[in-house]
Image (cartoon, helix red, strand yellow):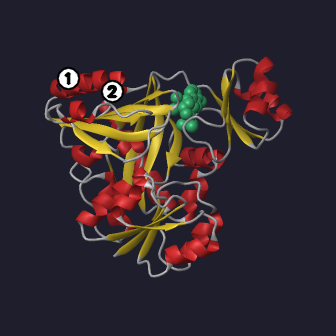
């Protein structure tokens, strides 16, 4: 099948790498003709709202999908008229609005922190009174990697926080004193088969994912299984087709659902070598209407993001068991340039490999 992907970044590249192996071909819509996905398919270069580029992109596609969720709705609508598009509008609309997202979580049995929709400075002040401080003010839509957010420690912070988020419709939510962060990546096929990868633990630095290990250590297996089941329930309720990730805060009282991403996710990159079927291959299978592969982990997996500056390749490649994924992007502060995966049958071996890689990455980052 010829599969069209809106967005040609590293997620598109990895979808292509996985999908080509099982016999599909790819076309990408991206403003940059030299985007990372250019290595694995044809790129239609154009803005995401350029009708001419959209028409050229969509022409003759068998299936269409996207690698990021902030695609203009009109663009996806135009593509969906020409080729079956997955995930669908319901997943996208829910994930694009932090209020709808949290209401959806709550309706499907996931615990969420206290929150309120706010659309004025006075509204934020009132929400602080009801939800409590400290809290976090976030734009309802278009936020990512911690952007469009401000922490409110007391009522005195409200004017600055409201200005910092750009005075747009927001969610005000209680600050969660979490011990760690975790996520579940899951996939649903077009005929309703839904499977989750094991709960994984995520560590962020400067608002960007730094590393993931799977399965998540220190989480009660019953709690992890419930998070996996709850994620599957959300995918089923949305009629989602493809991969989705739900991010959680881990607290002594259990997991609190934070947000969803209706696409392949950075916290699922470990699945390339660490699971029987990677999130990328499973997303392609789902979009293509094919049976899903097993989401079972091969052992103990880990992933470290390579952000800002590429460490010396030879050093990474010489670590036994390490798998380098280089997106071929130009280095820039805060930019995800690649990641490195490990997977071992033994926890101690995995942790030792991660420690060696962390040391290389720490020296390589500028
Ligand atoms: P988000 O864009 O919602 O994923 O938030 C980015 C990061 O900010 C999260 O991964 C957390 O580290 C932190 N954060 C967001 N919301 C909260 C919250 N309500 N309480 C505590 N930390 C938060």
Q: Is residue 126 depicted above or below 60 in this figure?
A: above
Kindly identify which residue carries mark 1. 352
Specify the quadrant of the image occupied by residue 282.
Answer: bottom left
- As drawn, the residue found furthest toward the right would be 122
Is residue 238 among what the camera can see?
yes
Q: In the image, residue 83 lies at what x, y percent?
A: 48, 77
Instruction: Please identify, in this view, whether the residue under mark 2 or under mark 1 is nearer the observer.
Output: 2
State the residue at coordinates (45%, 21%): 179
Side of 232 relative to 103 (left or right): left
Q: In the image, residue 344 lies at what x, y percent?
A: 16, 34
Q: Quadrant of the C terminus?
A: top left
State the residue at coordinates (22%, 40%): 323
- Location of ligand 1 given as a quarter of the image: top right
Question: Which is more toward the observer, 26 or 88?
Answer: 26
Query: Label 2 to label 1, Cα distance in Å?
Result: 14 Å
Disc 2 and disc 1 in contact, CB within 8 angstroms: no
Q: In the image, residue 66 lies at what x, y percent?
A: 48, 61
State the residue at coordinates (61%, 68%): 75
Local SS, label 2: helix
Kindly identify which residue carries mark 2. 361
Q: Is residue 81 depicted above or below 167 in this figure?
A: below
Specify the quadrant of the image occupied by residue 266.
Answer: top left
Question: Which is more toward the observer, 338 or 287?
Answer: 338
Is residue 223 among what the camera can see?
no
- Going from the N terminus, do you reach mark 2 or mark 1 first? 1
């Amino acid at each position: 099948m010829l599969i069209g992907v809106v967005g040609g970044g590293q997620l598109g590249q990895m979808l292509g790498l996985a999908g080509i192996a099982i016999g599909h071909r790819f076309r990408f819509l991206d403003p940059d003709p030299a985007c990372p996905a250019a290595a694995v398919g044809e790129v239609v270069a154009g803005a995401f709202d350029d009708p001419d580029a959209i028409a050229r992109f969509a022409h003759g596609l068998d299936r269409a999908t996207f690698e990021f969720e902030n695609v203009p709705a009109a663009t996806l609508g135009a593509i969906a008229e020409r080729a079956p598009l997955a995930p669908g509008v319901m997943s996208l609309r829910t994930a694009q609005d932090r209020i709808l997202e949290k209401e959806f979580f709550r309706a499907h049995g996931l615990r969420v922190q206290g929150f309120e929709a706010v659309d004025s400075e006075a509204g934020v002040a009132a929400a602080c009174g009801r939800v409590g401080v400290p809290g976090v003010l976030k734009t309802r839509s278009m936020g990512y990697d911690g952007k469009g957010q401000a922490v409110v420690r007391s009522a005195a912070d409200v004017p600055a926080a409201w200005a910092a988020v750009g005075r747009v419709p927001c969610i005000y939510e209680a600050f969660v004193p979490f011990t760690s962060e975790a996520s579940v990546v899951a996939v649903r096929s077009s005929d309703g088969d839904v499977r989750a990868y094991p709960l994984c633990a995520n560590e962020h630095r400067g608002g960007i994912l730094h590393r993931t290990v799977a399965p998540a250590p220190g989480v009660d297996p019953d709690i992890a299984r419930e998070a996996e089941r709850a994620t599957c329930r959300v995918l089923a309720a949305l009629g989602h087709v493809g991969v989705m990730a739900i991010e959680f805060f881990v607290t002594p009282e259990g997991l609190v659902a934070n947000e969803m991403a209706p696409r392949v996710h950075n916290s699922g990159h470990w699945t390339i070598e660490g699971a029987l079927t990677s999130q990328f291959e499973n997303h392609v299978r789902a979009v293509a209407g094919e049976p899903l592969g097993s989401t079972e982990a091969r052992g103990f997996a880990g992933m470290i993001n390579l952000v800002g500056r590429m460490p010396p390749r030879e050093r990474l490649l010489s670590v036994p068991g390490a798998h380098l994924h280089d997106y071929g992007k130009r280095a820039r502060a805060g930019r995800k340039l690649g990641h490195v995966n490990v997977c071992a049958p033994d926890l101690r071996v995995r942790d030792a490999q991660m420690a060696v890689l962390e040391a290389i990455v720490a020296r390589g980052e500028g």
